[in-house]
């Protein structure tokens, strides 16, 4: 049973009800709790972003990387 809010007397000790974390916006392998109090494990995979003034080398990066030409 997930718990998302803990109140002691009149004091709110923990309140996850407004949290926005979800598996798809938490880094892969990290664990947190969503607004319902349920544990979630991240699935977000970060891609690299390379910048430069020339054409990127074919040995850099992998599929899904973003290249910006700032020249």
Image (cartoon, rainbow, N blue to C red):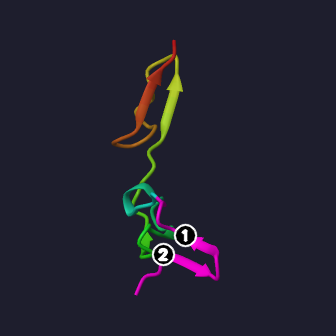
Magenta-highlighted residues: 1-19
Q: Position of residue 68 (x, y in %)?
A: 45, 24
Residue neighbourhood size for the residue with mark 2, other residues' Cα within 10 Å, grouped as few (<14), some (14–19), many (≥20): some
Q: Is residue 15 left or right of residue 2?
A: right
Q: CA distance from mark 2 to mark 1?
A: 6 Å
Q: Are marks 2 and 1 in contact (CB under 8 Å)?
A: yes
Q: Position of residue 44 (x, y in %)?
A: 41, 56
Q: Position of residue 23 (x, y in %)?
A: 39, 63
Q: Position of residue 40 (x, y in %)?
A: 42, 71
Residue farthest to the top, as pictured: 71
Image vertical order of residue 2 relative to residue 44, above or below: below
Residue nearest the viewer, comparing 31 with 67: 31
Name the quadrant of the N terminus: bottom left
Residue at the spot of label 2: 4
The label on residue 15 is: 1
Q: Is residue 52 left or right of residue 38?
A: right
């Amino acid at each position: 049973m997930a718990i998302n809010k803990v109140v002691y007397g009149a004091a709110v000790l923990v309140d996850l009800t407004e949290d926005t974390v979800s598996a798809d916006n938490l880094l892969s392998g990290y664990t947190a709790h969503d607004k319902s109090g349920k544990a979630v494990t991240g699935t977000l995979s970060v891609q690299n972003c390379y910048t430069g003034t020339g054409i990127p080398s074919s040995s850099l990066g992998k599929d899904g990387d973003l290249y910006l030409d700032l020249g």
